[in-house]
Image (cartoon, rainbow, N blue to C red):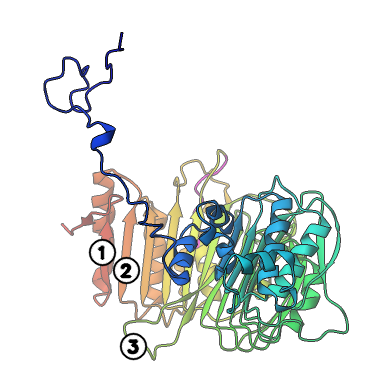
Amino acid sequence: MARANTRPCRRCHRDLTVCRCGGARRPASALPRRDADAGDRISALNDDLLLQILARLGCAHSAARTSVLSRRWRGLWTHLPELVLRDMTPESLDAVLDRVVAMFDPQARAHPQALTAAAAGVPELQTPLSLLDICIPWDRPLSLAQISSLFGAAARLQPASLVVDVTTSQSGAMLLPRLDHTKSMTLAIWGVFHRVILISPQDQEGDMPNLESLTLRRYDVFLEALLHRFSALRSLSIPNLDLSSITINLPLLQELFLIASAKLQRVVIMAPKLKKLTFHAKGGVADDFTLSYSAPEMEDLSWKCSRYGSRRVHFGDMWILRIVSIKTSEPLGQLQQNPHSNALSLDIMEWELEGATPSFEHCISSISPVANFSGLDLCINSRGINTRGHVYGAMVLHLLEVYTLIERLKVDLRKYKGRGLCSTNCPCIQLNDWRGQTISLTHLKEMEIKGIRGEDHDIDILKVILRSAAILERMAITFNIKSEKRIRLFSSKIHSILKAHPSVNCKIYRSSGEQVLPA
């Protein structure tokens, strides 16, 4: 007895024996037959189009797997202009590089793999590689022999751009090959307990005469000794410097990106053509830190030091310097002839500490690549369970006495509590002489204070600045309180003071950003 058809309907999903919607599938005999002589239309495309399809895969290892589709596709991946190798075993990497070198290097045309590919109808590669990008996961470390083989393949392929990001399972020295045609190179050879030291023969000068861009994810003193041989270098990036000193002396260098994780003791930057510099001493600088800096054509500067030595830089008995930042500000207005200017940012925090400390002036002069600033940004922090919200007026005026030529002042009172917990013997209360001071702020045009709580000393510091800055034009104040009564009282005091300074345009804002209009 024949078995009943129990397949469901493709429309109503009911059994076909009771389905009445007419959605039963057509029998196989009713389906259109494919013409056996139609051929593989994709494989019939020309080589350039097929290579564009393989390039969209983003990985040469995945492109190599397409060889199973057709004999027409076999070995075609070896002709990709950009060879990207990802998630491969060390053994597979060796095989792939050998295959590519055999197809590319004219001296290796007699290689069996090259002869096999030629017999299969794969054309010979005529143009050099534009990119050789090799990234092997950290859990698949390479031996020294495998890394040496990798560099040997790169030397024979001579790619325009080379990226190597691998992990090593051994320690030792390795020869950095000669790459005459490479213009961009990124090296990252990692190892938790191992390190590969790249060296160069002493008798070779100008190892990479065309190299213009270099990124060193892992930097050591041996690589530093190689830098002077990269005569054409325009861009240098070192995102993880683990040395206490570094010397950069490159005559054509235009961009430098340097982040140091170790505590720095000595930095030398001699680059007469340098246009853009990004520097960050994440590990801080030593007490005897020295800086030698020469970059007369600098246009874009970002300089940051997170900590200064083992001793803390103090302002009196209550404040310490945490972070120093220097950035290049944009030209004022739309006029291109206006020169770029430098702004100094200081992150300051409450910290009561006894003992001798280096002066602020000595700290800045030793770590700053520039001396003149048009802007001063102060971030004053009051954090932790032991902070008291000290009066900051004396400290701010001390800094204004140092930088009397600034054009813009910004004070950001972050998480500032006010001084309710200070005792009558607190130094911040005893230092009352600053309220009667007058400082020569002959260039100050803009001032902004954020985080005001409406204390009396907030009014006092505003009075000192207003009578010291004769050409002040704009002032903005933002509250850090929600009490409408205190906001209105403080605003009325400010507007009363501003009657003696009619040229100053002052705007007052609530913490929500809403402007407080005068009553």
Q: Is residue 8 left or right of residue 319?
A: left
SS of the residue at dot 1?
strand
Mark 1, Cα crowd under 10 Å, few <14 / some 14-19 / many 20+, is some
Mark 2, Cα crowd under 10 Å, few <14 / some 14-19 / many 20+, is some
Q: Nearer the viewer, residue 23 or 158?
A: 23
Q: Which residues are magenta?
A: 386-393
Contact between labelled residues 3 and 2, with CB atoms less than 8 Å apart: no
Pick whichever of labels 2 and 3 is earlier in the sequence.
3
Q: Residue 475 — which label?
A: 2
Q: Residue 335 — which label?
A: 3
Amino acid on which disc 2 is placed:
Met
- Spot occupied by residue 252 in the image (x, y as percentages of width and height): 64, 87
Contact between labelled residues 2 and 1, with CB atoms less than 8 Å apart: yes
Q: Is residue 519 left or right of residue 504?
A: left
Q: Nearer the viewer, residue 428 or 345?
A: 345
Q: Is 214 situated above or below 434? A: below
Task: Kindly identify the residue that appears in the image at 45 percent across and 52 percent down.
Answer: 414
